[in-house]
Image (cartoon, rainbow, N blue to C red):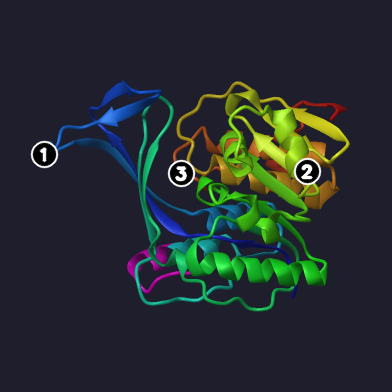
């Protein structure tokens, strides 16, 4: 049976820790969390969940009732079993291999002025050597590195030849490689989603405004969406610029917010082929996630997403 969408990307076990004490200081132009070398840092709370851009998006799509597959790599350790259990419970088909080694793992320090810092271990996530032929309406491509990136490029080439629509949500890791390195993934991409910082790095600019970045990126991708935190999200189809307005919600923890937003936009496009509606779905999904700890816990079902998305406003003006 063909899938509605296959999400390609990493899988991790995420451990969220809340330090009992911390020292936050300004260092140059940014804020740092500091601990003394040799110090034992007490933890007042700990939560274990699963994460990774690929599985986060896959679960988001499955919660909305889409027939979903996940393509990525798991190790032969206990953490892989945790991830498999979650995906099976969420009715996500596992399409990737199991290889010898450790599954991806992250330690996430939360409670840092409504933000977090992540210690990320990639594990076997970079070892997707090959991919099966995929029968799907859409592909969702998140960040992959190493051999997995090369496989992702091959998958996208096959998708283009087969007329499969695809979305690309790169991380800062990939944005730093520049447009030339990502040409196959970006050119003729049906939907490119990234945040303002990633867009600036990808384009090699520090002075261009969002409107200018949208224009530049739309020369490559068919639809472009740039997020800018509390300022909202901006998008273009090459003719109009769409501005999605955020609502004031209490931020508890932001891990997975980008994955939730991007998957929401794709789901909105699948449902209605309407960029404005996609933006509303993206904001609704991300706002649900940031109110809780964990990237998957509060991803919305289809009725809940429609209800929440309807509360958002999108302005449209000429690009």
Q: Which residue is mark 1?
A: 38
Q: Quadrant of residue 77?
A: bottom left
Q: Residue at x 85, y 48 (%)?
A: 273
Q: Which residue is mark 3?
A: 294
**Which quadrant holds the N terminus?**
bottom right
Q: CA distance from mark 2 to mark 1?
A: 50 Å
Q: Quadrant of residue 88?
A: bottom right
Indicate whether residue 72 is drawn in magenta.
yes
Q: Nearer the viewer, mark 2 or mark 3?
A: 2
Residue 63 % position (x, y): 64, 53
Q: What crowding class fits label 3: few (fewer than 14 Cα within 10 Å), some (14-19), or many (20 or more)?
A: many
Report whether 296 appears left or right of 234: left
Q: Which residue is mark 2?
A: 218
Report whether 296 appears left or right of 180: left
Residue 262 % position (x, y): 65, 45
Q: Residue at x 54, y 48 (%)?
A: 171
Residue 172 % position (x, y): 52, 45
Residue 217 % position (x, y): 73, 43
Q: Mark 2–mark 1 contact, CB under 8 Å?
A: no
Which of marks 1 and 3 precedes in the sequence? 1
Compared to residue 298, the image places residue 90 above or below, namely below
| The magenta segment | 71-82
Q: Residue at x 51, y 32 (%)?
A: 291
């Amino acid at each position: 049976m063909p899938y509605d969408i296959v999400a390609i990307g990493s899988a991790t076990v995420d451990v969220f820790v809340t330090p009992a004490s911390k020292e936050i200081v300004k260092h140059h132009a940014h804020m740092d969390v500091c601990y003394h070398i040799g110090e034992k840092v007490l933890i007042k709370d700990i939560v274990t969940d699963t994460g990774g851009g690929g599985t986060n998006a896959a679960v988001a799509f499955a919660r909305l009732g889409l027939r979903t597959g996940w393509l990525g790599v798991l190790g032969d350790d206990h953490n892989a079993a945790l991830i498999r259990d979650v995906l099976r419970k969420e009715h996500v088909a596992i399409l990737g291999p199991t290889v010898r080694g450790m599954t991806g793992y992250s330690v996430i320090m939360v409670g840092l002025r409504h933000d977090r810092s992540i210690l990320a271990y990639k594990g076997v996530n970079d070892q997707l050597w090959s991919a099966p032929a995929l029968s799907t309406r859409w592909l969702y491509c998140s960040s992959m590195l190493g051999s997995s990136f090369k496989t992702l490029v091959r998958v996208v080439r096959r998708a283009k030849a087969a007329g499969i629509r695809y979305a690309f949500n790169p991380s800062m890791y990939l944005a730093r490689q520049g447009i030339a390195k990502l040409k196959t993934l970006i050119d003729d991409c049906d939907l490119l989603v990234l945040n303002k910082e990633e867009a600036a790095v990808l384009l090699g600019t520090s002075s261009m405004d969002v409107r200018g970045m949208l224009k530049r990126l739309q020369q490559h991708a068919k639809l472009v969406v740039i997020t800018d935190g509390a300022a909202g999200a901006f998008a273009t189809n090459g003719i109009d610029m769409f501005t999605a307005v955020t609502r004031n919600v209490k931020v508890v923890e932001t891990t997975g917010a980008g994955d939730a937003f991007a998957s929401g936009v794709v789901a909105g496009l699948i449902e209605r082929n309407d960029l404005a509606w996609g933006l509303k779905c993206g904001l609704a999904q991300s706002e649900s996630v940031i109110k809780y700890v964990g990237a998957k816990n509060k991803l919305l079902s289809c009725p809940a997403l429609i209800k929440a998305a309807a509360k958002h406003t999108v302005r449209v003006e000429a690009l």
